[in-house]
Image (cartoon, helix red, strand yellow):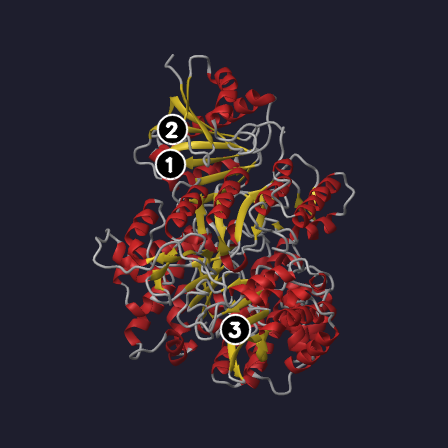
Amino acid sequence: MELHRFGIKLFAAESAGIRVKDFVPVFHSWIQRQAVDGHLLVDVHDYGHIQNGPGILLVAHEGNFCTDMAEGKLGLAYFRKQPAGTGVEGHLDAALKAVRQGAALLEKEPAFEGQLRFRKDELLVIANDRLLAPNDAATFATLQSPLSKVFGAGATLTHASANPKDRLTVRIQVPSP
Amino acid sequence: MPTWEEKLADSLNPQLADEIDKFATEITLRKQGKLDEKVFAETRLRRGCYGQRYDNGHRHDGIRSQELRYPADLTKGPDTLWDAPGMQRIKIPFGGMNPDQMDVLADLAEEYADGVLHVTTRQDIQYHFIHIDDTPAIMRRLGAVGITTREACGNSVRNVTACPLAGVCKTETFDVIPYAQATAKFMLGHPDAQGFGRKFKIAFSGCREEACGLVNMHDMGAIAATRVENGNVRRGFELYVGGGLGAVPHDAKLFDAFLPEEELLPFTQAISRVFARLGEKKQRDRARIKFLIAKLGIEEFKKLVVEERKTLTPDPRWTEYLGGVESYGEKPLKPPTFLNGQKRPEGFDGWYATNVYRQKQEGYVVASVTLPLGDLSSWQMRQLADIARRFSGDSVRTTVEQNIVLRWVSETDLPDLYRELARIGLGAPGAGTIVDVVACPGTDTCKLGISSSRGLAGELRTRLAAKSFNLDAAVKNLRIKISGCFNSCGQHHISDLGFYGTTLTVGNRKVPHFQVVLGGKWQDNGGAYGLPLVRVPSKRIPDVIDRITDRYVRERKSEENFQDFVRRTGKKELRSMLEDLTAVPPYEVDPSYYSDWGDPREYTIGDMGTGECAGEVVSIAEFDLASADRLVFEAQLHLDEKDYANADKLAYRAMLQAALSLVRAQWMEAPDDANVITQEFRTRFFDTNIWGDRYAGSKFAQYMFIRHENPPPAPTHDQAHRLVEESQLFVEAVVRGHDILKERGQK
């Protein structure tokens, strides 16, 4: 099995007045209309009582969406569970498409009244597999090529944490078009 | 690509590796269609892989019931889809973990679950939303740090639990941990424990008066005891058997006032053999050892076990661990010190008052880490592991109140420890108080959940925390425990204020409710079980708490405890105080009653049905059911007055009345005659399985049949208490039975 468990966090650029709990009915409505392409949306859980947890979790068979407060900033995270596409790039690309679709749906969500916008210039990619992607310089080096292919040659890739207990996390900064 | 199997080949105990290999093969065979789904279901359960809500591929989304179309057309058990997320239970014997194990537990939750670890009411840890294909890797990674999931579920010896203060407690007779450890190890996979009809739970306590290991509610429980013989102090156990919560709780019976330590394992083995041989196998709801003991009587059961003990072939494991028990102990990380004038961070004093226990070893304390709803994130768990490395070393335990404790903390370190816990969001005060609400998973993830126990617990926790500083001390020390259904995983029976989920149909809609259970006792090893008082809509439960606690503060006499207050006030009065809270406004007036806490979907426990002509029949049924409810309550009052004969009679009558309501839904002229009612009920609803597994109706029907066929000549307290509980459950099940008839258009 090749590395396919990627997580991606998009940071919110604007989120004034939005409470994490507001995502509960929104995610339920996504299930009602099975709103995310290529995903079987299953259930919603409120983990808002836990620090640095999944916040409000939308469980899908292919991958989970959740609100995320890592680095103290609200964002939308997506963690792929099932393989998608071919090769590491294919899996990365599938994760990116899913999280971008999720973000687009949230930005259009009437309940948020246009107050939620996601940044396009910076995101985090997390390799959620300590066997195939231990958090070290070698894995970071191996992933640079597929990451550059998916995010563009101009993207700046930074190894975000040196702690070997953490999952390999790469900060991606994309230059403005 | 490397695999965990290859990577951990040298780190795993060969026996455990073999066990996991077998399971991985069984997964492959099941995928190839070469292993029957029922057999696979039992084998995965014995490895702690449980099903989860909606794993039958159906989920009501608030508007309609959706079919969840997973890719694989395969099942992992009857009506359980392969790809549907499941739960993984992990045994943590006596709750003991070390920081390295905590790191791995955190990693696995992140990589295979949802990044959350849940501490259960039996000191286990659970992951939710696991894919069955990932479970062998999870098991290998756990096995590499000495943790097993084997027999975490299924008809086996479950996690052996023990008091989290064992070894440091000021009132214990001795440290029970070496015995709990030896029992867990000895019984794991033991051939004599493989033929049970149901699960078997064991607990250890160091003392009798505290809540300790909750021995009274266990299949087998051991309380540390000593005896002086020829001038020598001998260690042993006061051994109890046949306790249990579940739908109808049973008090454990004293098996032996002093079982010498060297007889602990052989007698555990002999008890297992007798249970495996004589325990019920076909009727799951009568298969726990408590039913066998109730049927045989404790003396006959004991006689059989003693005879069995004589037949056992001696096993060196019975005693080889005993050489180390006296010297057993944890090594503190730091020297003992005292809290002397250090600067105390903000919030420290409140936390110190509720979350710190001074050990019998001077200069050391146990610090409780309160976990809201028993949850912590992977990040918090890893941080907590580092905090443990810094302040307490390997002495970490989970608790049955869904918290974690750090033991052997040097007292001077407390302000720093508190700062660290607060930094990671785990510095909340209130451990073991009314704020520290315990709840099972309920409708969040459990297939049997009826109401949202976690939703309610979260709501109560928020409200109570906000006013905790103004709460009267007597109220502060009460406990709240919530179960999502009658099965009591939230341990509502042994709580001051207990609640379990139930439902009522109002108009054509279902309304989540909780049954209020009062009078349970946490102390004395879960020394008394509460009884249901009244069913209240979920949304009014916070009002129930306010009313009861306000009245307790206002009217308690001197140092009167809550159980005595409940007894003195009387259930009749308490019920009448809550009566108005039972009203449910029509949906059009207040739709909030028709959804559960934390879930915006309109509440349902399945697909709702509507019957055009239901009106009249329902009203007659409701009339009969109201009578049944009243009879149950009157039975409770007789029970309180120790009038067991009338309690029994009225509880039985309540069941007949409820059964009659269902029979009359099909045969309006059915006579009010016990023989006719039971016969008709059996023919129409039990034999046809109309009212079967979905709502456990068949299980509850047995309560009525058994009482009808075997009326006790002179009911004892235990018998009457049990029948009152059973009648309550039966009446509630009949309510759901009416819903089934409606759904099927048979009314």
Mark count: 3
Say which chain tag 1 marks.
A
Q: Secondary structure at mark 2?
A: strand
Amino acid at circle 1: Met
Residue highlighted by disc 2: A11
Residue B372: in sight, yes or no? yes
Outermost right residue: B34
Corner quadrant of residue B690: bottom right
What separation in Å lies between label 3 and label 1 (alpha carbons)?
A: 46 Å
Q: Which mark is residue A69?
A: 1
Amino acid at circle 3: Ile
Q: Is residue A71 left or right of residue B717?
A: left
Tag in front: 3 or 2: 3
Residue highlighted by disc 3: B223
Report if the CB atoms under discs 1 and 2 are less than 8 Å apart: no
Against B531, is B408 above or below? Answer: above
The answer to whether tags 3 and 1 share a subunit is: no
Q: Secondary structure at mark 3?
A: strand
Mark 1 or mark 2: which comes first in sequence?
Answer: 2
Outermost bottom residue: B714
Q: Nearer the viewer, residue B10 or A29?
A: B10
Say which chain tag 3 marks.
B
Query: Residue B65: x and y, percent?
Result: 58, 43
The answer to whether tags 3 and 2 share a subunit is: no
Q: Secondary structure at mark 1?
A: loop
What separation in Å lies between label 1 and label 2 (alpha carbons)?
A: 9 Å
Query: Residue B502: x and y, percent?
Result: 52, 61
Q: Residues within 10 Å of mark 3 (few under 14, many from 20)?
A: many
Corner quadrant of residue B238: bottom right
Query: Residue B434: x and y, percent?
Result: 36, 63
Q: Residues within 10 Å of mark 2 (few under 14, many from 20)?
A: many
